[in-house]
Amino acid sequence: MRSIGFVLLICLGNLPLMADGTLSTEGKTSWKIVLPDSPTEVEKTASKELADHLNQATGAEFPVVSEKDAPETNGIFLGNTSAGKKLLGNRPFAFDEIRIRTEGGNLYLTGHERRGTLYAVYSFLQDVVGILWLDPDRTFVPKKPTLVVPECDISYTPPMFSREMYHRRAQPTVFSARMKGNGFVTEPYGGRISILHFVHSFYRYLPPAEYFEKHPEWYSEIKGVRTAEHGQLCLTNDAMREELTRKVLETLRKNPGAKIIDISQNDWHGYCQCEKCRALDEREESHAGTLVAFLNRVAEDVEKEFPDVLVESLAYQYTRKPPKTLRPRDNVLIRLCTIECSYIQPLDGPQNREFAADMEGWSQIAKHLFIWDYVTNYTNYIAPFPNLEVLPQNMRYFVQHGAIGLFEEGEGDDFCELKNWMLMRLMWDPSLDEKQLFTQFCDAYYGREITPLLRQYWDVLVQRAKASGVYLGCFGVQSQNWLDLETLNQATRIFNDAMAKSEALYGKDSPAFQALRKAKMGIDYVWIQRYFALKSQARREKKPFEGPKDLGGMVADFIERCERFKTQSLAISQQSKLREQLEAMRSYDAVRRNPPEGCQNLEPDAWFAVDDALFANFKDVAQRVDDPASVDGKATRMTTRVDWNTSYTPTVQGKYRLLVSMRADAELEKGLAGNLGVYNSREKKGVMSHPLPVEELKGEEYRWIDCGVVDFQPGCYIWFAHRHNPQVEALYVDRLILMEAE
């Protein structure tokens, strides 16, 4: 496949200029933009976008006229014009295909009727004029008062039918459309590729509140008991399938024009273990056996009434492996998810062998294959996530194995503008050179003189992550798993040089400098998170320490940047805690007040305290409440609703003595109020569990729970659990302390 950008560059470099191909001369033009006499809404949008951007680039006004008023030459014909059809023929365009052609002193920009003309306009503006839409708020427009167009005859169809970048900095309609995405756009820009009941939809069709009491057999049997609590559907139950099919057809009738409807598992495990489901899955050597058999039956009924509708489902977690003998029907769409993969290696690398086998298996049996890919670190949205090198490799891997749709789930903040932009460019054209894309974006966004330093910064991080052997998943990865002191020092020096150069060249108020300030939040956050541990290591090992000389100053600056750049969360499901977490960073000295015995005799950086505001609180099941007895007036309150939802991942590795400040409200005088412990998620094993007796915690006074020395290895986190005894009203956690033990 040849790159459209590459073809246009050939036009610019090697072909003669078309007759009268000078669109503007010193800010003046005689050219007109020509629309069909009855233009579509999208064609009108295309004309406005073309006129506005050409004006910004050349200074010239390009009037928009109907075809009946078109000039014989010097016309830019958009869309379904009679002249365009006469020249190009009446063959139907492929979906999202674009056509760019010069002929007879005119320029023709057209394509597929839905939005091909708009994409042709954007390709022309980007690849010929040189305009770059960098993020929703910044556009690079070169000044070309004299603009010359070469002779061109280009037809291009993107290899992927559906292209979605899921990130708040990529989803606004206008930016998404300009980057030729089609997942988050409104009708004036061609509308989105919509999917009815988009993913995790089993219970949308058959909500347990409506059906379970009468039909428990329609839901998962788990350990011999039918349940809808974190369960799925019993996919071999014919009566259930008939009712679900009825609901699917009803949904399609209410949404005429829909082309895809989703029927997919809930977002947890809990698959059915009944005799029939188990037998089918065992025969197919995958839980996708029951899924595909079920989908085929539903899709067969859908096809009778809606022959052009695709039935979508997920190959996700327990259904990721393709079935041994069953094949999805031609009107079934499989969306394969990469959630378990490592993103420091390409998806066909050694760490991802199992996924590659599944990918290649589905590509052989599924006529329609979409991908749901993950390009962020949900555990730590801010810190560096060195996946940049594999993004283009994985994109090409998807296309090479037949993927026609891609949903890139981002959400994180680490160089998100660069990653979003590269991914959206590559979704449209996977053959583009990623090194050129990196340079093109960084030159325009951060400044040409800064680009070499940013390339050096990324090379340092990627090479260190590779050398560390880290499994760079989208969950559970903290910087201490791979980013060592030496590398952090080196990356910080590079970034400091970039900041100094940017300030000198462009000034502190420039968009380029402010963009660099935002990008630097990643390594600054690492220094804030790991300050005491890194300071201690540097002291013990007599190594340089490039971290902040004034931690409070860095924290204050980091908080200001969070507000300026509209940071939403530090980790997944923690949006509501952001302000508290930032304030907890600011009060790092406060939580060091009144430490337990032993801290006083240690170096100041040999122990550190962690405020409960920095704990993970999954789905906000625990509550942070006012408590005058706590060190900072607040504590995390865990009731019987809370199990392992409250946790903390230490920023240290090695042996540390763990102490936790806790208390309890309880009616009991004796007994077990709960437990706390350490779990290694990488090795999937418990490291330590410590009982919490009521008699040691009951009352309004906080007590130190000494858990002894723990060897914290990559993947370890500290968890807190209530025993679900109603006579223990609540457990409270104030803070924890880690003291060097070696």
Image: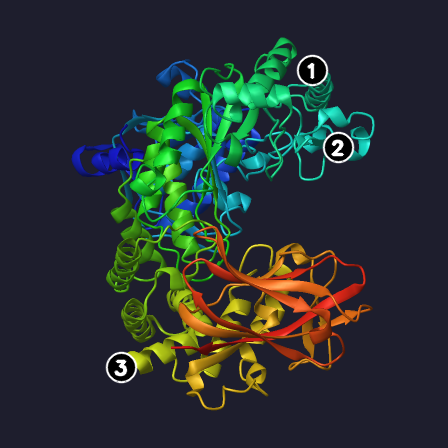
- Quick one: which residue is furthest to the bottom in this view? 601
Q: Who comes first in sequence, dot 3 or dot 1?
A: 1
Mark 2 or 3, which is nearer the eye?
3
Mark 2 or 1, which is nearer the eye?
1
Amino acid under disc 2: Pro
Pick the front one: 60 or 599: 599
Q: Residue at x 41, y 13 (%)?
A: 91
Q: How much space separates mark 2 and mark 1, taking CA atoms?
A: 17 Å
**Residue named by callout 3:** 542
Residue 669 lies in quadrant: bottom right
Amino acid under disc 1: Asp
- Quick one: which residue is furthest to the top in this view? 304
Q: Determine whether 326 is above or below 389 in the image.
A: above
Circles 2 and 1: CB atoms closer than 8 Å: no
User: Disc 1 on helix, strand or loop?
Assistant: helix
Circles 2 and 3: CB atoms closer than 8 Å: no
| Numbered circle sitting on residue 207 | 2
Position in image of residue 4 (x %, y %): 30, 33
Position in image of residue 687 (x %, y %): 49, 60
**Residue named by callout 1:** 238
Q: Who comes first in sequence, dot 2 or dot 3?
A: 2
Residue 490 lies in quadrant: bottom left
Q: How much space separates mark 3 and mark 1, taking CA atoms?
A: 70 Å
Colour pattern = rainbow
Residue 544 lies in quadrant: bottom left
Position in image of residue 46 (x %, y %): 48, 36
Specify the quadrant that holds the N terminus. Answer: top left
Pick the front one: 536 or 163: 536
Pick the front one: 127 or 592: 592
Task: Residue 441: tell me if it is visible.
Answer: yes
Amino acid under disc 3: Lys
